[in-house]
Image (spheres, rainbow, N blue to C red):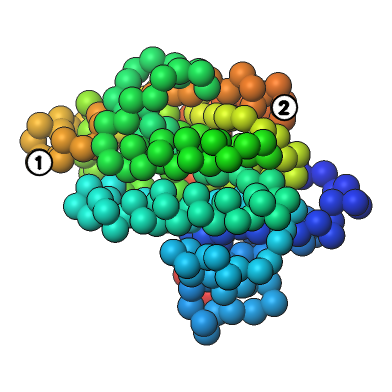
């Protein structure tokens, strides 16, 4: 099921602020809401990028930020797992301290806060996780996401935490490499012992846009339907591209020096509360792949233009 944002006249002029609008997810949400006619603003640290719709914000010094939107979507964070492990204190200042401080300021002014967390709060698992399940991060990135969740939810009402599973996008170097190699008939060697529960960028951004308009409170999950290995995903990708799946050669991660802070199994998440609110079901694997290939075609057009 694909979500559609419904144009409600009284919502059109109520400002929505996407903090981290130049991130992968933030940019997709901004584009979708903007195309639907909503009043969307984003933020930047770069003075040369400031405009009437792109507001200046230093996330680590947000006390002077004067804009007061109806809804805030917090997409900004340092997401590079290896960097977060290496520079824990630096990453924490952004991922936890700065995010909670900004949320507190905007919440005190009356904004509804929606925070984009991560499946990483659950670490390594093959079990379906409910919103009430006890988190158990496997790395520093997951721990910082969890600490930010706790800091935000402690501030009071008008807060929602959104936990998505793994996003697959052609903006991800590994995924882009797979698509381009498969398109050229070249062999790829995805892991057969690393598992994830993928969702597409389209599914995630459309769901987040709907949540931003509804302004719910609580914890909500956005998840793929199936936990699959990288190799299984790549086989479906190859088939959907009309490519011989024999050039997808599963390989074991033991052949490579994969750091221990990358959990080999990312769980699927129960979407019961999200389904009740939005009517959307966990995304099927085929739908994820279809959205990914559609995104890739748009990417090719942009590159060639």
User: Tag on residue 129?
Assistant: none
Spatial CA distance of label 2 from label 1 is: 43 Å
What residue is disc 2 on?
Answer: 277
Image quarter (top left, top right, bottom left or bottom right) of the N terminus: top right
Residue lying furthest bottom in this view?
A: 48
Residue lying furthest right in this view?
A: 9
User: At 57% from the left edge and 74% from the top edge, which residue is drawn?
Assistant: 56
Please tell me whether mark 2 or mark 1 is closer to you in this view: 2
User: At 68% from the left edge and 72% from the top edge, which residue is drawn?
Assistant: 53
User: At 52% from the left edge and 84% from the top edge, which residue is drawn?
Assistant: 48
Nearer to the camera, 69 or 126: 69
Please indicate whether residue 254 sits to the left or right of residue 191 in the image: left
Nearer to the camera, 94 or 211: 94
Please indicate whether residue 153 sits to the left or right of residue 91 in the image: right
What residue is disc 1 on?
Answer: 257
Q: Position of residue 93 (x, y in %)?
A: 36, 56
Q: Position of residue 88 (x, y in %)?
A: 25, 51
Sequence-first disc among 2 and 1: 1
Q: Position of residue 239 (x, y in %)?
A: 42, 34
Above or below residue 144? Residue 269 is above
Nearer to the camera, 260 or 264: 260
Query: Under tag 1, what secondary structure?
Result: loop
Query: Under tag 2, what secondary structure?
Result: helix
Above or below residue 16? Residue 290 is above
Does residue 6 appear in the picture of this structure? yes
Quarter of the rendering containing residue 67 = bottom right
């Amino acid at each position: 099921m694909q979500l559609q944002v419904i144009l409600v006249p009284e919502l059109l002029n109520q400002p929505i602020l996407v903090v981290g609008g130049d991130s992968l997810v933030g940019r997709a949400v901004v584009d979708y809401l903007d195309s639907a006619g909503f009043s969307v603003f984003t933020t930047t640290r770069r003075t040369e990028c400031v405009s009437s719709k792109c507001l200046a914000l230093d996330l680590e010094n947000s006390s002077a930020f004067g804009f007061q939107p109806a809804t805030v979507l917090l997409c900004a964070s340092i997401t590079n797992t290896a960097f977060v492990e290496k520079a824990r204190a630096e990453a924490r200042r952004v991922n936890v301290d700065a995010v909670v401080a900004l949320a507190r300021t905007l919440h005190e002014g009356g904004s509804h806060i929606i925070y984009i967390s991560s499946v990483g709060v659950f670490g390594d698992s093959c079990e379906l996780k409910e919103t009430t399940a006890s988190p158990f991060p496997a790395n520093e990135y997951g721990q910082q996401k969890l600490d930010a969740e706790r800091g935000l939810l402690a501030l009071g009402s008008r807060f929602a935490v959104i936990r998505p599973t793994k996003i697959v996008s052609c903006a991800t170097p590994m995924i882009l490499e797979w698509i381009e190699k498969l398109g050229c008939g070249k062999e790829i060697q995805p892991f057969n012992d690393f598992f994830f529960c993928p969702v597409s960028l389209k599914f995630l951004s459309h769901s987040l846009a709907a949540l931003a308009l509804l302004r719910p409170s609580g914890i909500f999950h956005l998840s793929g339907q199936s936990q699959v290995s990288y190799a299984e995903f790549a086989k479906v990708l190859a088939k959907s591209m009309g490519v011989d799946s024999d050039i997808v050669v599963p390989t074991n991660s033991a052949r490579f020096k994969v750091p221990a802070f990358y959990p080999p199994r990312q769980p699927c998440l129960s979407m019961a509360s999200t389904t009740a609110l939005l009517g959307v079901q966990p995304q099927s694997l085929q739908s994820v792949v279809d959205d990914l290939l559609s995104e890739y075609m748009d990417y090719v057009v942009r590159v060639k233009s």
